[in-house]
Image (cartoon, helix red, strand yellow):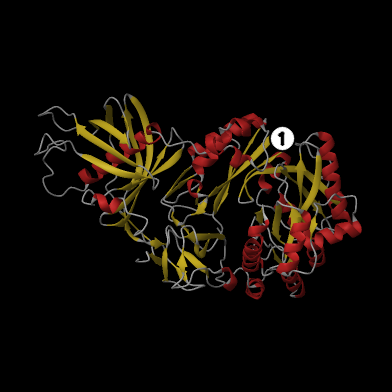
Amino acid sequence: MADEAYHIGASVAAESYLNGDKLIAVCHRAGADALHPGYGFLSENADFAQKVKEAGINFIGPTPDSIRAIGDKIAAKLFITANAPTIPLIPGYNGHDQSVERLEEEASRIEFPVLLKASAGGGGRGMRAVYDSSKLREEIEAAKGEALRSFGSDNLLIEKYFESIRHVEIQVFGDKYGNVYHINERDCSVQRRHQKVIEESPSPAVDENLRKAMTGAAVELCRKLGYEGAGTAEFILDEKTRKFYFLELNTRLQVEHPVTEAISGLDLVELQILVAQGANLNKLGVLDNIQYQGHAIECRLCAEDPDNDFSPRTGLIRKWSPATDIPGARYDTGVEDGSEISVFYDSMIAKVIVHAPTRAEAVRRMAAVLARTVILGVTTNQKFLISIMNNPRFQSGTFDTNFIPLERQRLFPPRTIDQVQSSAVATVLFEWIVQKDQRVNLRSIPSNWRNVKWKVPSKKYIVNNGEQVEVSYESIQEPGQRESTKSHAFRCNVTLYKQKVELPLAVTLYDTHFGQQTPGPQGIQGCSGLLRCSIDGIQRYFFIAEQVQDVNEKTYFVHDFVQGYPVELGKVDRLMSASATSEDDRVTPYTSSMPCRILKILAPTGTVVKKNDPLLSIESMKTEVKILSRHEGVVTMRVEENQLIDARVLLCQVDEVKK
């Protein structure tokens, strides 16, 4: 989408996007007189902003002094205490003594639970809730390590952890002449791992009096700072007491800024550029009497597996089709068919935004937009987002930051045969027609002809790396009837574990052609396309993409337009033995499920471990995951710290101790 693109180094952030000198050199090569820092990386780095300024380039953001004063969480609390003491602060520790011993002492003084936070951080990284003293030292060391890797500083602050609060933030804008405005609030209370999942504006929890108090506090803080450009003052809100506490001031544009744009009609990036080139917000007049319209919601569509503790996922996007034809829908993304979701960056694939006259309409519209969005080839949180939109507590607006744990049963219901049977049948039809179209020998033989008539063919698949589904199918074309090119009829039975469809499904496949295989970044890939069929008299549409890993290993991604989310079906090789499909934990290898970096070896070779002892920690897509032992034994480590590895690499072995 750019007129020019400059290569700035390897995908590892430290060698590219975190190297400020490279970015400034690109500005000079391009002849650019301004630099927009985006959302992450160096966007809140005061030293980088200073270097940009000294290089004669305009930094589209606040001054380096403002970033130093307020961008660091510890510095922000000190600044507020000295200059704006009326703004309430969360009880905690933000001192310069960062020794583990001092942090342990302060945490015990505050009382548990406490929240460890990276002072220079954001986005939930370097943030950990600790509920008792026994795990405090381990969590402090982990938070320090994560903060150092992500932000270049291992300084932490400690705060009292409120277990039932709303997360509400105020959008602010200042200029070079001391003018400061607010553009109302956003509610970001639906979170996982302290990272936002859903954002909306206005907040269902904020009335006019509370809005006036919170926006007033945000504007007062920015006036004391002499703040320039876009910023976001974040607060936690105790709904019971209606009290709010300052959390942090983000000195950049927020990921969720589109919901503010939707209800205000403003372009916040345009305002950033105007302020940077010297515009006076008073004279512009666009922020004086904003007429707020309706309600806006944003969902973060991420490459992650909600059923597996939201662990990140990588892969190749086989199909990307946003529902841009629905009124009020907006997508902010940079992906297309063939885009690779790699290990090096955040798991967010796209921001999906809707705008509607009321909150109830916005929720319904978001559910429809998500259901019409096709993304195949990578595991995402699409189904999870739809379940949030359909959740009664979310629809009522009466939720807090504990929403996901409290609603876990409704957000993660057991998988039923109704949820997978149509996708499984569509996959069988897909395989059948591909084989038919690609058949070379005996092309004149009818597709329903079988030599062994009493054996009904069947196919087995693993659903989303979980349960096994089996589909038996039989052509019911009349003997001697000329084969139609427009449709073909089947009788199907579907079994998901012990759940079985009572009666055979009457299925008709309509004229479809999937025979063309396509070359891509990973070699010759399988087929894909839109499949139309009827199941028990109901016409249905599915988009299906085939991913070929090996000769006997394929995965089918099926988007069901009725359910509105994809189902992953891994084909089970019919020659695979029963023992191979039910491996014992004692012999199952410890392999990487995704490309990752080895952060720390926690159990070196020769260590005797018990069940659930940590073996090593890995990092993928800015998320740290610990690998735990599945049984007692002796460790043989196969990787080294800081090693970059691909998926399916053997990490270590845990051999049983022979007695």
Front residue (pair 20, 500): 500
Front residue (pair 631, 551): 631
Q: With 534 as the anchor, is 203 left or right in this view?
A: right
Can you say whether 628 is above or below 302 in the image? below
Can you say whether 331 is above or below 100 in the image? above
Q: Position of residue 333 (x, y in %)?
A: 56, 51
Quarter of the image that includes the C terminus: bottom left
Q: Position of residue 549 (x, y in %)?
A: 32, 57
Q: With 359 as the anchor, is 225 left or right in this view?
A: right
Quarter of the image that includes the N terminus: bottom right
Res 359 seen here: yes
Q: Position of residue 619 (x, y in %)?
A: 53, 63
- Residue at horizontal 12 percent and vertical 37 percent from the top: 449
- Give SS at disc 1: loop
The image quadrant that residue 50 belongs to is bottom right
Kind of residue at badge 1: Pro
- Residue at horizontal 86 percent and vertical 57 percent from the top: 80
Q: Position of residue 376 (x, y in %)?
A: 42, 47
- Residue at horizontal 70 percent and vertical 58 percent from the top: 116
Front residue (pair 430, 244): 244
Q: With 395 as the anchor, is 110 left or right in this view?
A: right
**Farthest front residue?**
659
Q: Which residue is mark 1?
A: 204
Res 178 seen here: no
Circle 1 residues within 10 Å: few <14, some 14–19, many ≥20: some
- Residue at horizontal 81 percent and vertical 60 percent from the top: 76
**How many numbered marks appear?**
1
